Image (cartoon, rainbow, N blue to C red):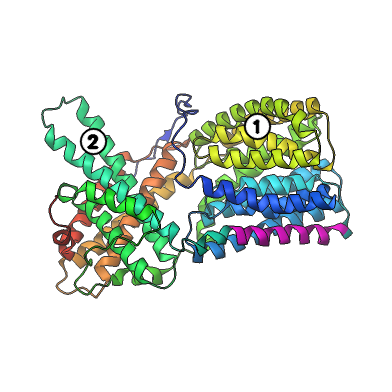
Amino acid sequence: MSSAAPTPSPARRLPLAGVLRVGRPSDIWFKPALSVVVAVGVPNLTLLALGRLDLAMYTMAGSLCALYAHNLPYAARARALAWVVLGMLAAVAVALVTASLTSSAVVLVAVGALLAAAQKALCDATRIGPPGPVIFAFISSASLFTPQTLGQVPGHLALAAAAGAWAWLVGMAPGLVRPHGPERRATARALNAAAAYAEMSVAPSASAAASTEASPTASAGRERARAAGAAAVHAAWQSLFATGARSEPRRALERLVVRAEIALAAPADTDPGRLRSWARDLRGTGPVPRVEPASAADELLGVEAERAAGRRPLADRLGPLLPLALRTALGCALAGYVSLALGVGRPYWALVTAASLYQANITLTWSRGVQRVVGNLVGVLLFAAVAPLAHLGPAALVLCCLAFNFGAEALISRNYWLGSICVTPMALLITEFTGFQRPGELMTDRIVDTVVGALVGFAAAVAVTNRRAGDRIEIALDTVERAREHTARLIVAERPAPGALDAARRSLAAALVELRATADAAAGEWWQRAVPTERVLLAERTGHRTLATAVRRQGLHALEGTRA
């Protein structure tokens, strides 16, 4: 390794093209959309019938937990949703107790910023997935600015807990109809991603006379397809590891994921059509497609070996996230204080806007900021159009909120700004559960807080450098090299332990996925040493060659056969 001091990477151009591009919806967009409508609707309609819609703020805290963990198998989802509910209750408890002890806006903003930073770090460390820490920050910040007495806190927490229990039931209910649905979807994604890579890998050989100018573009496209395929396969294994006992449907899914691994290792000898056919069969409720066993013993012993390895301790995963947590704390606090200085009555909106920006690097944070501002401004106009309808009565208010809940989840997977168009009027209408307010004042506060939160939040991201991003690349490179060497030793071993090569192969694949994610995150960060692009590409290529060799050593290649 060179002893020369690394050259810091400069500030990169912030993108505008493509930031607002509308993509394809998530394949399960309707699941969180319907779940949140049921989870929010039942408590709110009950409060409406009781004439206590003013308590909806507390039930919303528990109900919105239904947005989480839809990609997880039900055994893992049960645990994850329980932790989400407990985490929400803890945040709300801190907020309500603080609100009951002080009315100082300065103190409330500081507590809100610290909560947002803790929520950001924990959500990223546990990889809970969308919607991430934003929902936690929204609820806890709003709770901080809700007038409260200490004696009311237990009752309000009880309402949140009851709604959280209902959200847990709503999240688990689909398992009664399709108990292996999440694992089937993850396996289908892996098969489709592997098929896409196989198709791209075969295409260049059929057009060897292509112009030299197109070759780099085609090569980059294949690299991206391979990385996407490896990530999808890794996600499928993670989904299967979380399912508990190895039932027969799970064993059948394991064999299909192995076929996706084979396609990535030997794309020229893969039939993409067959992979896509299996993926289509997994989308329904029919039986899992049966394929030949991946080994003579019909056992994937490496699966159990990898499950036994466990995950890194939470403290180790939190360490690299400290710069992001510091950005969140600083940005949220400054956004709240600027909003207070401007005389805005709801500084927590600026705080939440800042909290919503922070992504893996500055470039992604900038993109999220543009999306947030555009979505919120359009959402304010939508609120202006809907407010007269919502003000017809409490029932109309509740129904409008439910419609925006559904719309937000239906649109947000296409692009964040589209979802924000529905989130903004929903947040404005929630403030009216305690009584109708003047739309003009609400709209003005929301616009000011959105602009303040976005500008101040991004400035904090630029000010707080993340020099650990470069360190994480070095760690990821070392991890890939160790995993590759371990796999290579097992390949040449005369009789490796049962399942050892299987587990080593997947460990190497996981390390390659982590390296690509780490490199992508560092590539969009400012004021750090330059990303060692050539070393990363070399590690990826040698790692994938070792994976292909491991497939041949295990004899899996022969099982796949030639393309039909």
Q: Position of residue 487 (x, y in %)?
A: 24, 63
User: Where's residue 204, x and y in %?
Assistant: 16, 35
Front-lying residue, 520 or 136: 136
Q: Which residues are magenta?
A: 152-170
Residue at 83% of width from left, 35% of height from top?
A: 436
Q: In this image, 197 relative to 524: left or right?
A: left
Q: Does the stretch in magenta take in 157? A: yes
Predominant SS along the magenta part: helix
Count of marks overlaid on the render: 2
Q: Residue at x 58, y 36 (%)?
A: 419
Whether 364 is drawn above or below 135: the answer is: above
- Which mark, residue 456? 1
Say the numbered circle drawn on residue 90: none
The location of residue 354, given as percent across then percent down, is 64, 37
Q: Of residues 395 and 208, which is closer to you in this image?
A: 395
Location of residue 425 (image quadrant): top right
Distance CA(mark 2)–CA(mark 1): 40 Å
Which amino acid lies under the numbered mark 2 shown in the image of this protein?
Answer: Ser
- Secondary structure state at the residue bearing disc 2: helix
Counting residues from the start of the chain, the first of labels 2 and 1 encountered is 2
Does residue 1 appear anywhere in the picture?
Answer: no
Residue at x 68% of width, y 27% of height: 380
Q: Which residue is mark 2?
A: 219
Q: Secondary structure at mark 1?
A: helix
Quarter assignment of residue 18: top left
Corner quadrant of residue 329: top right
In front: 442, or 370? Answer: 442
At 75% from the left and 31% from the top, the residue drawn is 389
